[in-house]
Amino acid sequence: MPNLFRRCESNPLITTKDLPYEANTVFNPGVAEVDDEVVLLLRVEDRRGISHVTVARSNNGVDGWRIEREPLLAPGLPEWPYEEWGCEDARVTKIGEQEWAICYTAYSGFGPGVAIARTNDFCSVERLGLVLPPNNKDAVVFPERCQGRWRMLHRPLTDGQEHIWYACSDDMIHWGMPGALMLERGGPWWDGLKIGVGAVPIRTEEGWFLIYHGVKQLANRPIYRLGLAVLADSCRHAITRTSTWVFGPEEWYERTGDVPNVVYTCGTLLRGDEVWMYYGAADSCVCLATARLADLIRAAHEL
């Protein structure tokens, strides 16, 4: 297994000790680059067990994080009942010169569903509401239209199976024309139990580069690892996909936590020729690993 990703020496970057208020855990951040700053959308689980999304900013993307005292996306608003139990796992896509789409999991007694909000400053949001009903999650919007329509990847629960699907929209509110993109492999495979989208796909000369997570059921618990794929320009099928995982829980902060043996990404930044992958470790802290994009694309074809 090639050592594609290099873990940041400062890991974990953010723990609950860094928050300006009490919480149980912080993990699974979405990420954007705004005015030469790195902006993370942290999933914070409070001590009731309910999650919200809070903004953190850093000049260098590693340290000096300035974390907001109030959430950007908070559950419990009566006009948004499908978020009653939480706003989780935000994935951020730049869709304009100064506009971003935030896909997140809206959690309620009906189960997890896909919601979208828009922002131009990460200080406030315009909620579009629930766009795909439960049970569905792990959604992300592509950063450009394809054949005039927006494309989304998402992970519905279909007859006990959890595959990655795509959908299309003219307005980001009404989604249709679905299709299955990538399937869980089943059996003993590292991604046999379920798969889901990781970070926002990156446009390359070879197609859309995608990091995704796969889950295997061990004797007494699941283990979450990351694999790679390259998608066709149409966003409707995978050109190639790794047969092996490329990044898995190894360090103590990935092995020990509320949910042990988990590495889970919701966002990357392309900085020069490097992919900066921010990820949640063991559902308990926020970490960073980096890799050269060219090496990742090569691995997607060879592994």
Image (spheres, grey):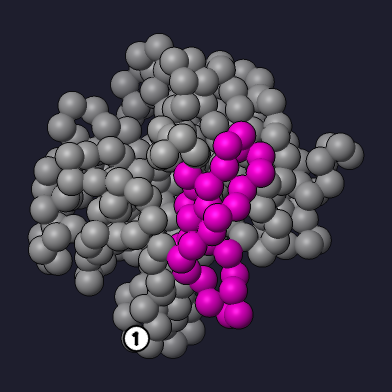
Could you tell me residue 233's position as x and y percent? 30, 46
The prevailing secondary structure element of the residues shown in magenta is strand
Toward the top, the furthest residue is 35
Q: Is residue 169 visible?
A: yes
Would you call the spot at circle 1 few (<14 residues within 10 Å), some (14-19), or many (20 or more)?
A: few
Please name the residue that numbered disc 1 is placed on.
188
Residue drawn at 37 percent across, 50 percent down: 235
> Which quadrant would residue 272 be assigned to in this image?
top left
Could you tell me residue 127's position as x and y percent? 70, 32
Which region is colored magenta? 151-180
Q: Seen in the image, is 260 located left or right of residue 204?
A: right
| Rendered-image quadrant of the C terminus | bottom left
> Which quadrant would residue 133 be assigned to in this image?
bottom right
Amino acid at circle 1: Pro
Q: Is residue 50 magenta?
A: no
Looking at the image, is 83 positioned above or below residue 124?
below
Residue drawn at 41 percent across, 52 percent down: 198
199 or 285, nearer to the observer? 199
Residue drawn at 66 percent across, 25 percent down: 125
> Which quadrant would residue 126 be assigned to in this image?
top right
